[in-house]
Amino acid sequence: MDAVQGTLDELGTPLSEVTFVVFDLETTGGSPAEDAITEIGAVKVRAGEVLGEFSTLVDPGGPIPPFISVLTGITDAMVMAAPKIESVLPSFLEFIRGSTLVAHNAGFDTRFVKAACAALGYPPPGNPVVDTVDLARRVLTRDETPNAKLATLARFFRSPTEPCHRALQDARATVDVLHGLIERAGSFQVHTLEELKSFVRAPTPEQQRKRHLAESVPHAPGVYLFEDERGEVLYIGKSTNLRNRVRSYFTAGETRPRIREMIGIAERVRHIVCATALEAEVRELRLIGGAKPRYNRRSRFPEKMVWLKLTTDVFPRLSIVREVKDDGATYLGPFTSTRQADDARIALHEAVPLRQCTQPVTLRTRRAACVLHEMGRCGAPCEGRQSPEEYAVHVESARRAMTLDASPVFSAVSARMERLSVEQRYEEASVDRDRLASFVRTAARMQRLSAITRIPQLVAASPAFGGGWDIHVVRYGRLAAAGVMPKGTHPTAFVASLKAAAEVVIPGPGPVPAASAEETECILRWLESPGLRLVEVDGEWSLPVHGAGRHKARIDLAYRHLDQRRPREGRPLR
């Protein structure tokens, strides 16, 4: 039979002939079900030429949260006269007709478009979608750009447009990023739209060649360790089904560049079977902290956490430290960086006039007060203007804010943010927002951890798959034993045996005296799982009535827009 030459159509659509609509949305939050669009910006391009732009503010039908206004600069006054989404959506759908959609972290934007279509009775757009985050992770290395944030990529590709969380501006920047990524993809012989879409998801030759590494891994909960030919641990993970999870690393579904790179080096997969999923999660954390595998990004350095310490001087101050001591001081943390701890310290200083100087101050100290005294932010104990008894009132206020009631800090920083927003000083307000978030989130986390780390022993059970119960012994916030009690087993004898075999835990000082904060948080998540039963609690398990947790919900709501909008782009590249 004579060979038949393929047509150009069979070869795919050349990228130079594809009409792309690069778009971006601003919204009142991160949930399409609860939040609304406030701005749409889109740029239509083909072969590097701009064919048209679409830009409009949108009346969301309700107030824009202040934190979102700080982020985007879009206020209620700006959208008051803007059209509603029912007037804007038909025009936008017409603008994107017949095009390939492009967005940075496209899942966020397309979910809002689909939600708007569903609410107004329009069919969801069936346009092909290209995500510049995924494409960047495929063609760029960590040496070139540390992450896939739009601002980072725009700088890398020398875009004249700087992203600023305004829809059209960000869409224009994404156009430049798209063109840079397409040019880079050409070196991988990607020349058509079809090749571009499959290129991001295709497994590498190394992934295909090393599928046999998963053959000896069992279907059981536990921890897996990828090792190189010398036995060095490259990556550690955990799963409720070890075999299925390890096999997934050798499929097209695994697109993380650094993990694909790791697969190319790995020569074996070692596994540790665990009794329960919680034991596997805890073992993973402990192994990562000990081995510090180079391809794990999280949990490698639990010893590098920092704390905010209210010292025990005659005139205490807030100090950032790396070690919790048994010295009677009050600690807030842990923080993942000194910067976060300093943000929390500045937020606390906004509410409580503690001294901020680092020099020792005693009853005999006499030196000129700094400008903070003139501003009314310090009582100048260094000049002898304030007695230890008078200063102790502020110390107690700081201690309460750190451990029991964050309301004074929340109110003081929120008032300052509101003043800055009224003056349209949004950048300064956003800095205060981050400082408040650092304080509130860390205080809420510490109070939650402390509630369980105070308990000498806690035994709890959750329903196990296939019947029976997963039972764990927790001592001072540390997992001391794990076991699965088969269906029909007498619980009293089983629990007594598990407790007898459990690890002896001697607590140290501070809010997390026996385990890493991450380990205790894993245990807390399990304790909140459906169907859990408390078997034994030695002591009291409680949270402060006016704790930071009630303010954390408001903080998280304000950050939902940013966190869900860019959930993956901030991760390091390979």
Image: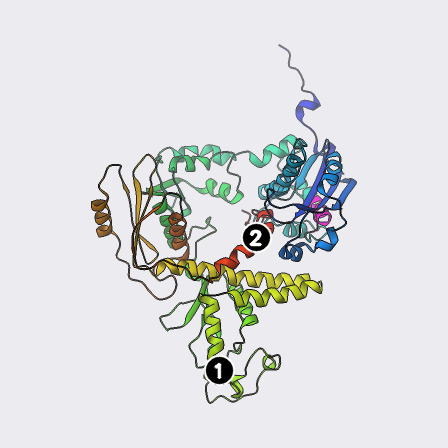
Q: Give percent across and percent down for residue 164.
A: 69, 54
Q: Which residue sits at x=74%, y=51%?
A: 80
Residue located farthest toward the top when viewing the structure as drawn: 1
Q: Main secondary structure of the magenta part?
A: helix
- Mark on residue 390? 1
The residue at the point 52 percent across, 78 percent down is 355
Q: Is residue 285 left or right of residue 356?
A: left
**Which label sits on residue 421?**
none
Most foreground residue, 143 or 99: 99
Q: In the rendering, at what x and y percent does residue 541 appear?
A: 36, 58
Relative to 34, does residue 439 appear above or below in the rendering?
below
Q: Which residue is mark 2?
A: 557
Of residues 136 and 416, the one drawn nearer to the viewer in this rendering: 416
Q: Mark 2 falls on what kind of element?
A: helix
Task: Work out which quarter of the rendered image holds the N terminus and state it.
Answer: top right
Q: Is residue 208 magenta?
A: no
Q: Residues within 10 Å of mark 1 (few under 14, many from 20)?
A: few
Density class for disc 2 (Cα within 10 Å; few <14, some 14-19, many ≥20) is: some
Q: CA distance from mark 2 to mark 1?
A: 38 Å
Magenta stretch in the rendered image: 166-176
The three-letter code of the residue at mark 2 reads Leu
Report x, y in % for residue 533.
Answer: 33, 46
Q: Secondary structure at mark 1?
A: helix
Q: In terms of sequence position, does the residue under pointer 2 or pointer 1 come before the other?
A: 1
